[in-house]
Amino acid sequence: MDFKRNILVTGGAGFIGSHVVRLLVTRYPDYRVVNLDKLTYAGNLMNLKDVEQMPNYVFVKGDICDFERVSELMNRYAIDGVIHLAAESHVDRSIRDPFTFARTNVMGTLSLLQAARNYWESLPEGYEGKRFHQISTDEVYGSLEISHSEGIASPFTTNASSEHHQAYGERFFREGDNYTPHSPYSAAKASADHFVRSFHDTYGLPVVVTNCSNNYGPYQFPEKLIPLFINNIQHRKPLPVYGRGENVRDWLYVEDHARAIDLVFHKGRTGDTYNIGGFNEWKNIDIVRLLISTVDRLLGRNPDEDMDLITFVKDRAGHDARYAIDSTKLQRELGWEPSLQFEDGIEKTVCWYLEHQDWMDQITSGAYEKYYEEMYGNR
Ligand code: NAD
Ligand code: DAU
């Protein structure tokens, strides 16, 4: 079958990647979506069980750092668009093992850029109709000051705005702000973004970059705050809050991120950067309390008893104080809006984890790592 477009999604078995793959294969039956994923500890093919049999979906187990392999895939599948999500993504792991982060996030990105460039330059039409979309993070901008410890009414409103709707400082990350990463994770992502822009400026590679705030929702690996704490609350295990829980993050429902990626991939201006976020700042400790009350309400338990699970532990080294992203450009130029109020998104997310205990059990038991062989044999 001839496909209208052939898109290479990297890291599609991860949290955000699986939502992007699902959206693309279902929304665009005339596109072929090739998911290239190494299946590290964070890659989980069970995240894609509902779409794995779709005729326009192909899974390839492989490493983005393997330049020969990536080059061969570009040719074999006549790739005309790359949406690059594959990365080592957890800040705490980057503090323990920065080399792995530099290898995957920097060298892996360079390998993809070079393979895309070689392949597209070899075609008669060159870069026409091609796109390399780099999925980046707000963490590359560094850390903002918390100047209002109690928060003030946010100057921005969106569909995601809740009663909470607060800003903890005057400044927001804007496109064009200097990059000042602090963790090995964000330093590696920043370096990758610089390579992406250098390929645009030097070779004319048609790139676009998006920088998104913290995502939450189904299929997030339970090392990250929200799924880890939902699981711990459910099983009445301690909740390790770093420092005093005063750090501020800006949260977006993962499907809203996937929709923004779809929009920017198709309609974003080549060479541009778009920030993605819902103006939804929360202190960690307030999220933890919201999670306890939501989980306990849904389980018919008394939340007062579980507040004692909160355990303040040693702070993360170099812990960024506040992230807050200004996504006005994306909203004005491309008409994107977040769809969910945070409290509704959290309710939906908690329900999903409670109803998918099997998904969580397969991770905690390690069974999810065997699913590739069951599905694809020794390929
Ligand atoms: P994740 O850790 O859940 O998934 C990463 C995926 O990449 C996994 O499937 C893993 O197997 C794969 N991968 C890792 N190394 C690979 C390699 N060498 N070759 C091929 N595949 C490899 O990550 P996530 O949270 O879904 O984040 C996806 C992307 O979005 C990352 O680039 C991250 O920096 C960015 N991002 C994440 C957030 C967030 O809140 N999670 C916010 C903004 C941006
Ligand atoms: O901002 C976007 C980034 O969001 C992405 O680029 C990263 O890939 C993603 O992991 C996320 O980074 P954070 O470090 O903000 O997410 P994490 O879930 O690890 O932590 C959220 C906040 O909660 C942070 O301030 C640290 C704190 N925390 C986290 C964990 C895991 C705790 O207090 N206790 C914990 O056990």
Image (cartoon, grey):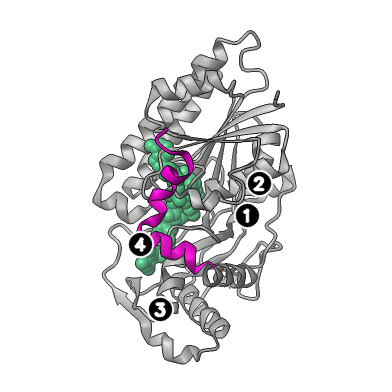
Vertical placement of 269 versus 128: above or below? below
Q: Which residue is mark 4?
A: 365
**Alpha carbon separation for disc pair 1 and 4:** 27 Å
Instruction: Name the spot of residue 131 as percent of width and height, x first.
Output: 61, 27
Q: Quadrant of the N terminus?
A: top right
For the point 46% across and 66% down, which residue is it? 227
**Alpha carbon separation for disc pair 1 and 2:** 9 Å
Does dot 3 land on a helix, a strand or a loop?
A: loop
**Alpha carbon separation for disc pair 4 and 2:** 29 Å
Task: Name the amino acid, label 4.
Answer: Ser
Q: Which mark is residue 255?
A: 1
- Packing grade of label 2 (10 A; few <14, some 14-19, many >=20) is some
**CB atoms of marks 1 and 4 within 8 Å:** no
Instruction: Name the spot of residue 57 as percent of width and height, x first.
Output: 61, 37
Earlier residue among tags 1 and 4: 1
Vertical placement of 322 versus 243: above or below? above
Q: Which residue is mark 2?
A: 23
